[in-house]
C-alpha cells in the first residue's frame, strides 16, 4: 500500500505541474489550441483513474497505466510543438517547469521500480510454505506489477 501511495504521489506531482506548464505556454506564445486542449484532457483522464491498493488487479493497473501513457504522449506532442517557439524556450518560468517535469519523470521511474520490487516480494511471500497455507485460507492473491507500455522505459524527451 505504501509503495503504491508513492507511485500515485509522483504521478500527482506531474499532474500538478501541468496547469502551470499549460498557462506558461499559453501566455508566452500564440499556441496551437488543440495541442493544449489534448494535454488538459489527458491530465483530466489521468487524474480520474484511481486504483485500490488493496486490490491491485491487472485490469485496474492497465487502466491506470493507459491513462498515464496517454498523458505522457500528450506532453511529448506539446514539447515537440514548443520547439517552434524560440521565445518560449528562453522563458525562465518555462525552463524551471521543464526541469521540474524532467525530475518528476525520473522520480516516477524510481517509484515504479520500487513498487514492482515490493509486489515481487509480496507475491513470493504468499507462495512460500507455510505462508501459502495462510494466504490460501485468507484468499490472499498475487498483486499486479506495474508494466509500462512499450517504449515507456525511457521518460519522454522534454527539450526546449
Image (spheres, rainbow, N blue to C red):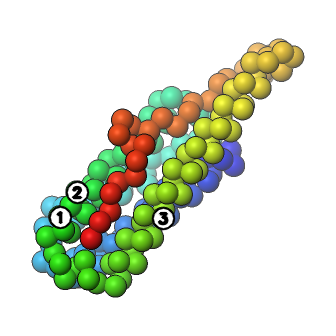
**Which SS class for mark 1?**
helix
At 19% from the left and 82% from the top, the residue drawn is 87
Q: Nearer the viewer, mark 3 or mark 2?
A: 3
Q: Quadrant of the N terminus?
A: top right
Question: Is 57 positioned to the left or the right of 100 in the image?
Answer: right
Task: Name the residue beneath numbered marker 3.
Answer: 103
Which image quarter: residue 17?
Answer: bottom left
> In x, y percent, where is residue 40?
29, 62
Q: Quadrant of the C terminus?
A: bottom left
Q: Earlier in the sequence, mark 3 or mark 2?
A: 2
Badge 3: few (under 14), some or many (20 or more) residues near its Cα, within 10 Å?
few
**Contact, CB < 8 Å: mark 1 with mark 3?**
no
In this orientation, which residue lies closer to the viewer: 71 or 102?
102
At 40% from the left and 47% from the top, the residue drawn is 154
Task: Name the residue beneath numbered marker 1.
Answer: 81
Question: Is 12 positioned to the left or the right of 70 in the image?
Answer: right
Q: CA distance from mark 3 to mark 2?
A: 19 Å
Q: Is residue 14 above or below residue 28?
A: above
At 29% from the left and 66% from the top, the residue drawn is 159
Badge 2: few (under 14), some or many (20 or more) residues near its Cα, within 10 Å?
some
**Contact, CB < 8 Å: mark 2 with mark 1?**
yes
At 63% from the left and 45% from the top, the residue drawn is 114
Question: Is 2 positioned to the left or the right of 37 in the image?
Answer: right
**Which SS class for mark 2?**
helix
Amino acid at each position: 500500500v505504501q509503495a503504491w501511495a508513492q507511485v500515485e504521489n509522483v504521478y500527482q506531482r506531474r499532474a500538478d505541474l501541468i496547469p502551470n506548464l499549460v498557462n506558461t505556454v499559453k501566455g508566452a506564445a500564440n499556441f496551437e489550441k488543440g495541442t493544449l486542449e489534448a494535454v488538459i484532457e489527458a491530465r483530466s483522464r489521468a487524474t480520474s483513474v484511481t486504483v485500490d491498493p488493496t486490490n491491485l488487479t491487472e485490469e485496474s493497473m492497465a487502466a491506470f497505466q493507459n491513462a498515464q501513457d496517454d498523458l505522457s504522449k500528450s506532453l511529448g506532442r506539446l514539447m515537440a510543438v514548443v520547439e517552434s517557439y524560440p521565445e518560449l524556450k528562453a522563458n525562465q518560468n518555462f525552463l524551471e517547469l521543464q526541469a521540474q517535469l524532467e525530475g518528476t519523470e525520473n522520480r516516477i521511474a524510481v517509484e515504479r521500480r520500487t513498487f514492482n520490487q515490493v509486489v515481487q516480494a509480496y507475491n513470493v511471500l504468499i507462495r512460500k510454505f507455510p505462508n501459502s497455507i495462510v494466504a490460501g485460507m485468507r484468499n490472499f492473491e498475487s498483486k499486479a506489477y506495474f508494466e509500462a507500455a512499450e517504449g515507456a522505459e525511457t521518460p519522454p524527451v522534454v527539450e526546449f
